[in-house]
């Protein structure tokens, strides 16, 4: 006769067997690696594709967008092990990096773009 597995109730009503093997979750680490790869790729290719003064603002925007995406993923996945990195942690790291890139960029170079006109002579200098 087969021995029944012990089950533990979860907050949303389902249960999982306690004896089931736990699969390691590499989602947050993979997301951080993908975001850093995206940043490195952007820093490598952007200076040739756009004017140099816009490189850091574009990287900042990419990092903040990635942080917002991961915050949405973290919000949809409640319950996490606080001893391991999770999507909230990765989102916070990307937010900090995005704000740092924004602080290092020059606002005078981005303001004309936001106003709707971009003088070419200002970029070339």
Image: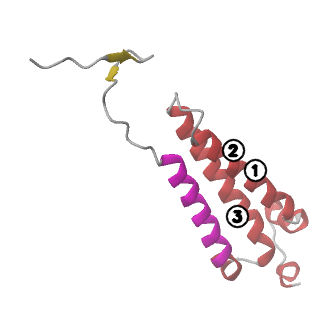
Say which residue label 2 marks. Answer: 92
**Residue 114 - label:** none
Verify CB contact (< 8 Å) between mark 1 and mark 3. Answer: no
Tell me the distance, in whole angstroms, between the alpha carbons under discs 2 and 1: 6 Å
Looking at the rendering, in which quadrant would you find the C terminus? bottom right
Secondary structure category for the residue under label 3: helix
The x and y percentages for residue 58 are 71, 64
Mark 1 and mark 3 lie on one chain; the one further toward the N terminus is 3
Secondary structure category for the residue under label 2: helix
Q: Residue at x 59, y 36 (%)?
A: 83
Query: Height in image: 52 above or below 105?
Result: below
- Residue 11 lies in magenta, yes or no? no
Say which residue label 3 marks. Answer: 59
Q: Residue at x 85, y 63 (%)?
A: 104
The x and y percentages for residue 101 are 78, 61
- Residue 29 lies in magenta, yes or no? yes
Mark 2 or 3: in front is 2
Secondary structure character of the magenta stretch overall: helix
Say which residue label 1 marks. Answer: 96
Query: Height in image: 72 above or below 102?
Result: above
Q: Which residues are magenta?
A: 27-44
- Which quadrant of the view contains residue 47? bottom right
């Amino acid at each position: 006769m087969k021995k029944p597995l012990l089950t533990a109730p979860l907050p949303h009503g389902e249960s999982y067997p306690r004896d089931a093997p736990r699969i390691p979750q590499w989602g947050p680490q993979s997301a951080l690696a993908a975001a850093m790869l995206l940043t490195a790729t952007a820093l490598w290719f952007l200076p040739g594709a756009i004017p140099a003064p816009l490189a850091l603002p574009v990287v900042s925007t990419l990092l903040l967008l990635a942080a917002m995406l991961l915050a949405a993923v973290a919000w949809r996945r409640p319950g996490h092990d606080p001893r391991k990195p999770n999507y909230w942690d990765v989102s916070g790291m990307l937010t900090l990096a995005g704000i740092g890139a924004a602080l290092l960029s020059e606002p005078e170079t981005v303001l004309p773009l936001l106003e709707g006109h971009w003088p070419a002579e200002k970029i070339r200098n």
